[in-house]
């Protein structure tokens, strides 16, 4: 069973920065895509950023230019660098790892989440 362990969540003032880490118990080459999602209180979980095994990235419009996703294959870790944080970035951030098959099947693994709170 794959385990994903997030860390780095904290309370920060608006305009500040945080770096989230997601350490996987398996080689991250095993996954087609790894990403960060977030869920604010009373809202649905949403994709924040994702990175493929080839290094291609995509971001939610709300975080483009402020957040950067990266991966360290040697450490089996994915990072989310968050700059210029806003109160609306407050949420529980979840790490996701996805395996995709050519027949369309997908398998998702999730971490336990890490709280990010941005004060105004």
Image: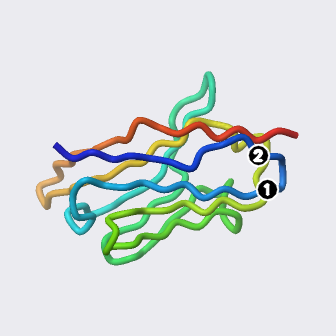
Furthest residue toward bottom: 54
Proximity of marks 2 and 1: CB atoms separated by less than 8 Å: yes
The quarter holding residue 110 reads top left
The quarter holding residue 38 reads top right
The mark found on residue 44 in the picture is none
Furthest residue toward top: 42
Q: Residues within 10 Å of mark 2 (few under 14, many from 20)?
A: some
Tell me which residue sits at (79%, 48%) in the image.
86
Is 101 situated left or right of 110 in this image? left
Residue 78 percent coordinates (x, y)? 43, 62
Is 33 situated left or right of 93 in this image? left
Residue 41 percent coordinates (x, y)? 63, 25
Residue 50 percent coordinates (x, y)? 45, 60
Q: Residues within 10 Å of mark 1 (few under 14, many from 20)?
A: some
Q: Quadrant of the N terminus?
A: top left
Furthest residue toward left: 103
Q: Is residue 12 above or below residue 21?
A: above
Is 24 situated left or right of 37 in this image? left
Q: Nearer the viewer, residue 28 or 43?
A: 28
Q: Is residue 109 above or below residue 35?
A: above
Residue ID for mark 1 = 16
Tell me the SS state at disc 1.
Answer: loop
Tell me which residue sits at (21%, 48%) in the image.
106
Residue ID for mark 2 = 12
Residue 19 percent coordinates (x, y)? 60, 58
Tell me the SS state at disc 2.
Answer: strand
Q: Is residue 59 above or below residue 54?
A: above
Q: Nearer the viewer, residue 88 or 58?
A: 88
């Amino acid at each position: 069973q794959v385990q994903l362990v997030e860390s780095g969540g904290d309370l920060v003032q608006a305009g500040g920065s945080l770096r989230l880490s997601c350490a996987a118990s398996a080689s991250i080459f095993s996954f087609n895509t790894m990403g960060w999602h977030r869920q604010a209180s009373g809202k649905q979980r949403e994709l924040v950023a994702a990175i493929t095994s080839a290094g291609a990235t995509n971001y939610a419009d709300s975080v483009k230019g402020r957040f950067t996703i990266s991966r360290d294959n040697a450490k089996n870790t994915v990072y989310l660098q968050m700059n210029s944080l806003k109160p609306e970035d407050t949420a529980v951030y979840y790490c996701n790892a996805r395996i995709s098959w050519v027949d369309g099947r997908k398998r998702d693994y999730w971490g336990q989440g890490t709280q990010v709170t941005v004060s105004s």
